[in-house]
Amino acid sequence: MSTNADFQDIKIYPRFPDRVVIQWAVINAFQSGTYTFSIYRSENSSDDFTCITPVPLVNKYRFVDLLVPNTTYAGQNSLFTKNYYQIVMTMPDGTEVASVIVSTGAFTQRDVFLKVQEIQRKYKLLSERYIGVPTYLLKIRKYGENCPKCWDSVKHESRDSHCLTCYGVGKTGGYFAPELMTGHFEVSPQTEQITSERGGVDQQESNFRAIADPLIDPYDVLVEKDSNDRWIVYKQVQQTEHKRVSVSQIVTVREIPRSSVLYAFPIPEQDTFEPQVPDADALLSTHRDPGALE
């Protein structure tokens, strides 16, 4: 087993009209301490990379690159400019790890840009007016300070699933700060009988559909803003794409019992994040027929 952390996955996608989002995941982050990330950008895949984060990002999992939407001036970046990105992670012991180089690719094409933008606009209207549920996303922490109360340095995991310091994750804090998004739950009539110390508990399963920003991964937690009902992400079912550009995502979630320590994770009373949601009729049809947008 490697003792050095490494990048597991890097996703890059547009946030219309003028931003690019880079989101990453890290594996083997066994060192305890601060992980920093520097983002580099270039119009050339081989050299001339410029650091666009003068102050390194501390224990983060994504970065939003605000571009210049006006495309009439040469040399200005926009969603129509093909850019290349690389992330350099500095581990607590000072070791630096560089990611693979990723590019903005297909969404620099104007027809792709306009189609995806329209899909997301329609879904935003549908979700906000009719079916959407304001929901906080809690991204699980996979790097940072090891929990001082329950971290097992041999097994590299938490020894206490009820720990109030890491919420059973093993990293201090357990989850990143909540991000508010809008999506909707497709509740399944099926339930699963989960055995606990107090006996059987009926656990409801559902699919959650939302715009692909931010991306949701297994073991993340969703919190319904109004009811405070909490769900853990069980698996990722589908990402709807148009010309290789992510439009929406569907994940399977399971209801978290009210007795779980995850209900102790604090959620802010006031929103500090702007809801991000995609398109409507087209999105619903493409869930049934992914080729409908081709």
Image: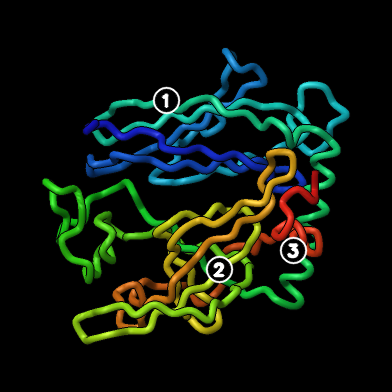
**Where does label 1 land, which residue?**
98
Residue 135 position, x and y percent, is: 56, 71
Checking the image for residue 207, the label placed there is: 2
Residue 98 position, x and y percent, is: 42, 25
Instruction: Tell me the kind of residue under disc 2.
Output: Asn
Rendered residue at 59%/60% (across/down): 250
Q: Nearer the viewer, residue 148 or 141?
A: 141
Above/below status of 159 relative to 89:
below
Q: Earlier in the sequence, mark 2 or mark 3?
A: 2
Determine crowd level at label 3: few under 14, some 14-19, many 20+ residues with C-alpha closer than 10 A. Answer: some
Determine crowd level at label 2: few under 14, some 14-19, many 20+ residues with C-alpha closer than 10 A. Answer: some
Instruction: Tell me the kind of residue under disc 1.
Output: Ala
Rendered residue at 70%/59% (across/down): 287
The quarter of the rendered structure image containing the C terminus is top right
Q: Nearer the viewer, residue 34 or 21?
A: 21
The quarter of the rendered structure image containing the N terminus is top left
Query: In which image quadrant can residue 30 be found?
Result: top left
Rendered residue at 77%/70% (across/down): 126
- The answer to whether 114 appears left or right of 216 in the picture is right
Indicate the secondary structure of the residue bearing disc 1: strand
Above/below status of 81 relative to 241:
above
Residue 228 position, x and y percent, is: 48, 80
Above/below status of 15 relative to 49:
below
Residue 32 position, x and y percent, is: 22, 44
**Where does label 3 land, which residue?**
284
- The answer to whether 92 appears left or right of 126 in the picture is left
Query: In which image quadrant can residue 52 be found?
Result: top right
